[in-house]
Amino acid sequence: MSEQLPPTEQCRSCKAPIRWARTQHGKHIPVNAEPSTSGNVLLDHIGGVLHAGVMRGNQLAAVRRTDRPLFLPHFVDCPNAGEWRKR
């Protein structure tokens, strides 16, 4: 990561600590504050913006061989995730 991660916020539903990041498509995604061994989101904090790269397949395997932490999207374990999904 180029810069230190920004402070955490609380999920408005379950109050868990999260960070908001921007995907490559410009959408915002809530990410759990702590890294996870089953994570698939690579975070980079550059120029005050937290960028989220969702890793799949070979990319994911390559990142897991490094010391870079991976994070889970908060939708995975938020008990109230369904309330926030767009229809």
Image: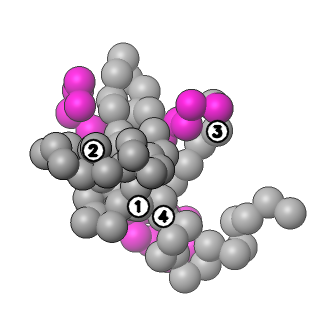
Neighbour class for label 2 at 10 Å: few (<14), some, many (≥20)?
some
| Lower sequence index among marks 3 and 2 | 3
The disc label shown at residue 63, or none: 2
Quadrant occupied by the C terminus? bottom right
Residue at the disc numbered 3: 27
Q: Quadrant of the N terminus?
A: top left
Whether label 3 touches label 2, CB < 8 Å: no
Quick one: SS at disc 2?
Answer: helix
Above or below, 15 relative to 32: below
In the image, residue 38 lies at what x, y percent?
Answer: 33, 67
- Along the horizontal axis of the image, is 2 left or right of 54? left
Looking at the image, tell me whether mark 2 or mark 4 is earlier in sequence order.
2
Callout 3, which amino acid? Answer: Lys
Q: Are marks 3 and 1 in contact (CB under 8 Å)?
A: no
Where is residue 85 drawn, in percent x and y?
Answer: 73, 65
Secondary structure mostly seen in magenta is loop
| Residue under numbered circle 1 | 72
- Binning the other alpha carbons within 10 Å of mark 4 as few (below 14), some (14 to 19) or many (20 upward) gives many
Nearer to us: label 4 or label 1: 1
Disc 4 to disc 1: CB gap under 8 Å:
yes
Location of residue 45 by image quarter:
top left
Q: In this picture, is 71 found above or below 83?
A: above
Provide residue 2's location: percent of width, then percent of height.
Answer: 23, 24
Query: In the rendered structure, which amino acid carries the disc numbered 4?
Result: His
Q: CA distance from mark 4 to mark 1?
A: 6 Å
Q: Give the colour scheme shown.
A: one colour
Disc 4 designates what residue?
74
Does 37 sit above or below residue 6?
below
Work out how far the residue at label 1 is from the one at label 2, CA to CA, in angstroms: 14 Å
* Discs 1, 2 touching: Cβ within 8 Å: no
Q: Position of residue 60 (x, y in %)?
A: 37, 49
